[in-house]
Amino acid sequence: MADSRSEITRIFLLVAVTVVVVVAVFLIQARRSGLTVREMFSGPPPTITETIEASRATARVGERIDFLTPRPVGAAVGPDDRPMVAHVSIADLDRDGLNDILVADAAANRITWVRQSPAGTFTEITIGEVAGPAHTQAVDLDRDGDLDVAVASLGVLFPNNAKIGSVIVLENDGRQGFTKRVLAEQIARVSDVRAGDLDGDGDLDLAVAQFGYDQGETRWMENLGGWKFESHILQSLSGPINAEIADVDGDQDLDIVSLVSQEWEEIYVFVNDGRGSFTSNRIFGASNEDFGSSWITVVDLDRDGDADVLYSNGDAFDYAPPTGRNWNGLQWLENRSNVEFRYHRIGDFSGASSPQAADMDGDGDIDVVVVSAYNNWERPDAWSLAMFENDGQMGFTLRPIATTPTHLITLAVGDLDGDGRPDLATGGMHMSYPFDRMSKVMTWMGRR
Amino acid sequence: MAKKRRGEARVDGPVVFTGTEPTGRPASTTESASQGQDGGGRWLPPWLAVVLVAVVAGAAWWAAGALARRAQGGVLPPMADLSALPEPAAAQVREADTGARANPRSADVVGALGMAYHASLMTERAVETYALAERLDPASWQWTYYRGLLLEERGRQDEALDAFRRVTAANPEMGMAWFRIGEMAFKAGRLDEAEQAYGRAGAAPPMAPFVTAGVAERRVAPLTAYAQMGVARVALDRGNRDQAVAALDAAIAAHPGFGPARTMRVQLGADAGAEAPALRTEPSALRTEAGAYVPPSDPLLDAVVAQSRMRDMLLKHAALAGRGGDQGWREFLVRRALEFNPRDPNVLMEMAAMLQASGRASEALDYLRQREQVAPGDHQTLVEQGRALAVLGQLEEAEAVLRRAARVRDAAAEYNLGAVLDRRGRLAEARTHYERALEIDPFYARAMNNLGVSLDRNGQIEAAVAMLRRATEAAPENAEAFSNLGSALIGARRLPEAIRALETSIALDPDSPDAHNNLGIALAQSGRLADAAREWDTALEIYPGHVNARRNLERLAGMRR
């Protein structure tokens, strides 16, 4: 009996020692590997897994697509030229049924009209001298039945703190003769002007982004009639690039969406009470002060009936080399109602600028086309134009389109050839080396 | 065979498992051992028990290790594709990868691999590798911090915020992490959290700036100043302007050279239609450079930057250092960029710019010529060459180079060509090029200034006054333009205006002997001789060799006699 007890004790001891040793071994290994024992059996905690996966979570890169025919239009580019087109927009300025292209030419300090007449023939005409033009919008501001051109004037393209900006309208006499009207001047450099009835009185007011340099502003200008406007300052931050007008909160009045770059890297919605009284809401901010905000476009990207914000970060002009940053790319802010937005990264794209939304492939969902102003142009795979193809579920595949010409900073979408399919117009901003693949204004006609 | 050999080897041992257990039951082992211990011959011998436990322990060790590796998805993934990296950076990653594979359980070694990826701008791999280092040693918060930096850089705010919160949980005195939490909370509109985090950042013990061999000292603004600026933004968001002003004034008082707070304070003053009191005593703060925003110095990030071999990372931080006046750090970074990218046109240009800014035009010229070889046809290189040659007094060569540059419609080329022709005494030609510069850039203040001076010299005084007034409007921080305007106004006998312009010039740059001399002349012509004498004395204090000031004083003394 005693032998039996002793035997059981020994068995127990041996098993116990073995178990203790095994447990100790697992604990030691767990500590060495930075996991808990449970995690050793179940895998790492989701936060780390997500981190690793999310670090790769950008658009897939698909095949290059070739469905656009590029063609330079307007004045030719000589070897000693350095085109600096700040903005292109598509509009039928003379209302002849053929879309034209408006060009903000910052190298020549003028606004030109690349007129399409007859169909397929484009001729560039200067319609106004403007110092450092940054943006144009064709709009019937005086409601006389023709399209005027609202122009944002920086004064100079390069950084400057002086109050040299102005808000200008090129008033159309109905026969495409234009008279320059200065609505505001000697203010911080103006980067964007958009028209809309902001106070509900039936005329068109203006939303104005003033980039400035160290000091900038966002304002709206109340139309008092007779080409008189009264300014109302909305915000005093440097670096506003865009001031888009849209009904963001669905209350049937127009709000203002502004992109503020420089060190702020923020997007604001100024919510209108319908009478021109605005409440500021910051809907996004990157704490990377070098995020490189470059453009916003307000569009219903997910087709759910409200206004989302398509947003690129690709500005790399701040310091050398001007070759894009590896965090550059595209994202969209999903309107979740009540001026709340949810951030979605679409994908990486070096030097991303001027994203535009359109159903490029005709499959019923909205794709995104984008240009690059700052890429590493010495690399053969440095894309200057690309499409992010929507799979219909807001998943995107990057489809490179072109590497030539380089330095494309502005892009417009519209039907230029009247075939019902979206075409593109681009503008080149050649401020930095290399200068071997330059363009001023190009059209990219859709073939499918 | 093995069992038999064991049995045979121990036949003369104290108690031996004989192998004769008839049933073959496993229990026979313990029975034998038990018997053996009791002298009965049926229990395992102690050595065999130890061996058994050791074998089980070994198997457990192997199994646990395999489980851990599986759970981590492998301690280290295969080395990344380095084909897109320049060779020096690829070599750095390869070396770090080799080290990590030799010691894959070391958080420090794996973290160092993360830093190599980070320094080589391979963000995804760096994030992944830092995450592994975190798992290897959860107490080493720096890997979490680095991962947070990369997530923040890519705009992934929520994940970055989570990382920085982990850092502050592990090290509550990590001020930079608190500051970043404050920034992200502010951007997300969580003002209370932001305010609290800025408070913790401001109260945290300061971290010593990163220094390395070749960088004697760093010139950086303290984190407390940034934290106070953050508090000011929170106050502004809450509509509390007075609190914002108080926070900014405190930041400026404690750190007078902190440009971003000055800029914001000026803006707040302008909004309220009042000048900021804290700025009155230092008008030079209104100059452009004073307002440039530079992010707070981060010693941990600088440690990554210092080991980088990538042009983009090095030049970015060199630019920030230059903007913040941290010249030693700037030079270290630019030289490092050059060491690993000796033929890169951007690096050559930055090297030249740095040398030119520090007065080493001859060395700058050498790099600019190298750049011209690798980036032919770049007119900006030619403009900079022309400037360097002009500084060196090689005006003929400068003119030739600038004429080549001016084939491109470029305001800087025209302006610099005008300046060289001015110095060569070809004033009419110079004026033509200044005018061309202004056609291209209508707000080119230096061209206006030089053209104004040229018109003044040519006797076209009213045209000169108009042009110089435009220059002061285009560049209100330009002391020289105000001084020249004052001088032209003296010529036009518009003395009160001249005095105002010269006083503005002196307010912007109190150390300009010419402005003091000119102000003395304007005052003397206005009959204020004692004031005039004081200005000429000041001019001579600043520059004892100022001939005109001395002559003016002597004339005044003669008049008094």
Image (cartoon, grey):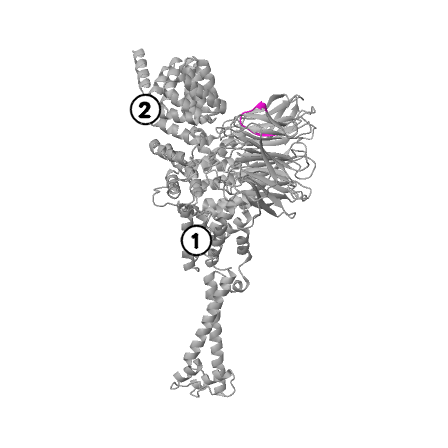
Q: Left or right? Give the position of B157 relative to B420.
A: right
Q: Chain of mark 2?
A: B
Q: Secondary structure at mark 1?
A: helix
Magenta span contains residue B474: no
Q: What is the number of the mark on residue B113? A: 1
A177 or B475, which lies in front?
A177
Dot 2 corresponds to which residue? B543
Q: Residues within 10 Å of mark 1 (few under 14, many from 20)?
A: many
Q: Residues within 10 Å of mark 2 (few under 14, many from 20)?
A: some
Task: Name the residue type under label 2.
Answer: Tyr
Q: Is residue A2 left or right of residue A194?
A: left
Magenta highlight range: A125-136
- Determine the residue positioned at 34% across, 42% down: B216
Label located before the other in sequence (1 or 2) = 1
Image spot of residue B83 (x, y percent): 46, 49
Residue B440, x across and y down, in percent? 49, 24
Up/down of A37 relative to B400, above or below: below
Whole-Å distance between the Cαs marked 1 and 2? Answer: 56 Å
Whether the magenta-drawn stretch holds residue A132 is answered as: yes
Question: The residue tagged with tag 2: helix, strand or loop?
Answer: loop
